[in-house]
Image (cartoon, rainbow, N blue to C red):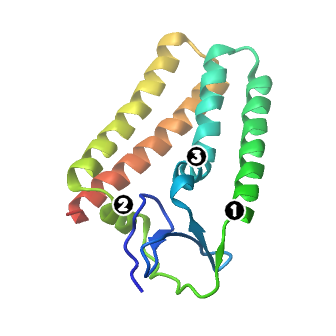
Amino acid sequence: MQNKKTMKGKNLYSDDKGRTVLYIPSEHIGYYIPKGEEQKLSLFQNRFLLALALLILLINLFPDKFLFSIGIACSVLIVLEIMYRRFKNTLDKLKKFEAPKRSGTIDIIAETYSKKDCVTRGIALIGFGVLIVLNAVLSGFSIQLMILNGAVCFLCTVYGCIHLIAASKAK
C-alpha cells in the first residue's frame, strides 16, 4: 500500500489506486475523498483557525462587544463542525486501511513542504504574531484583548518555530 500524500494536510494519504484517503486515527477509519471535494475538506480541516480569525476580526471591529464577538465565532464554529460531520457521513468508508506509521508534527510538516516553504511559513507566522501584538499595543486595546492577542502571538511563535525546525528535516 502506498502512503504518499496527494493533498497537503494532516492524516491525508493515497491508497494503492492513487485515491486520496482521509484517515481519522481516533476512529481507526479511512474515508475516500472524491476529486471535487478536496477544497471542501480543506475548509473543514481549517474550521478552528477560521473561527479564531473571525473572533480576532470581530474583536477588533467591535472592541466593546467582547461577548458578542465570542458568541458569533462560536456559532460559526458549531455550524462548520456540523457541516464537517455531515460531509464525513457522505464519504465512502474504507473497509481495510492500514494505519500509516504515526509521525510527529515536525516530520509531517517536513514531508509535506519544501525547505523554502517551511522557512517562509515559519517567518510569516512569527511575523504575524508580532504584528498582532503591535496592533493591540498601538490601538490601546483593553486588557482582555491584550491577553487574547498575546495568546495568539504565543501560538504563532510556537508554530512558526516548529516550521523552522521542520525546515532542517525538509528536502
Is residue 65 positioned above or below 55 on the image?
Answer: above
* Separation (CA) of disc 3 from disc 2: 19 Å
Q: Secondary structure at mark 1?
A: helix
What kind of element bears circle 3? Answer: helix
Read off the residue under disc 3: 43
> Eyeballing the image, is 116 above or below 31?
above
Residue at 74 percent of width and 58 percent of height: 85
Of labels 1 and 2, the one closer to you: 1
Which image quadrant is residue 56 in?
top right
Q: Residue furthest top?
A: 139
Q: Position of residue 126 (x, y in %)?
A: 36, 38
Image label count: 3
- Of the residues under marks 3 and 2, which one precedes in the sequence? 3
Q: Amino acid at mark 3?
A: Leu
- Residue 10 in picture, x, y percent from top left: 48, 63
Q: Residues within 10 Å of mark 2 (few under 14, many from 20)?
A: many
Q: Residue at x 47, y 26 (%)?
A: 132
Q: Is residue 44 above or below residue 104?
A: above
Write down the residue under mark 2: 109
Q: Is label 2 in a helix, a strand or a loop?
A: helix
The amino acid type found where label 1 is placed reads Lys
Q: Amino acid at mark 2?
A: Ile
Left or right for 156, reference 162? right
The image quadrant that residue 87 belongs to is bottom right
Query: Which tag is nearer the camera, tag 3 or tag 2?
Result: 3
- Which residue is tagged 1? 88
